[in-house]
Image (cartoon, helix red, strand yellow):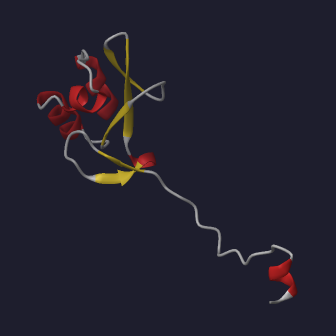
Amino acid sequence: MSQSTQRGATATPDAVTHTPIRTCAGCGEKSPQSELQRYHQHDGDLVPGPGEGRGVYTCRRLACFERAQAHRGFNRTLRKTVRVEATLARLYT
């Protein structure tokens, strides 16, 4: 055994950063978390941005937001019925 192994030193591979992957509630594509729009529920309403608890993501395309709304993707992912205000669509323009 070499001395470095005896002392508990281990060779470290190149630093690899982990990028969280999330699934769009509209189209179902997987993308890095930083490329998606996050929502959460607050008092029964769908709210954009970071927040406590379970979150749901969509691509930054209006079509994905509308599809998630029409196919109840927000409710399914959040495991709760939420109200989706029409004004949230302005985030995509």
Image quarter in which the C terminus is found: top left
Q: Where is 24 relative to 92, above or below?
A: below
Q: Where is 16 relative to 3, above or below?
A: above
Left or right, residue 48 beside residue 9: left
Please, which residue is most extreme toward the bottom here? Answer: 1
Left or right, residue 58 beside residue 63: right
Evaluate whether residue 93 shows in this view: no
Tell me where residue 3 sits by quadrant.
bottom right
Image quarter in which the N terminus is found: bottom right
Residue at 30% in and 23% down: 88
Q: Position of residue 42 (x, y in %)?
A: 39, 15
Q: Where is 50 relative to 64, above or below?
A: above
Please, which residue is most extreme toward the top here? Answer: 43
Q: Position of residue 48 (x, y in %)?
A: 39, 26
Left or right, residue 72 beside residue 33: left
Evaluate whether residue 44 shows in this view: yes
Q: Position of residue 31 (x, y in %)?
A: 35, 53
Q: Where is 47 relative to 7, above or below?
A: above
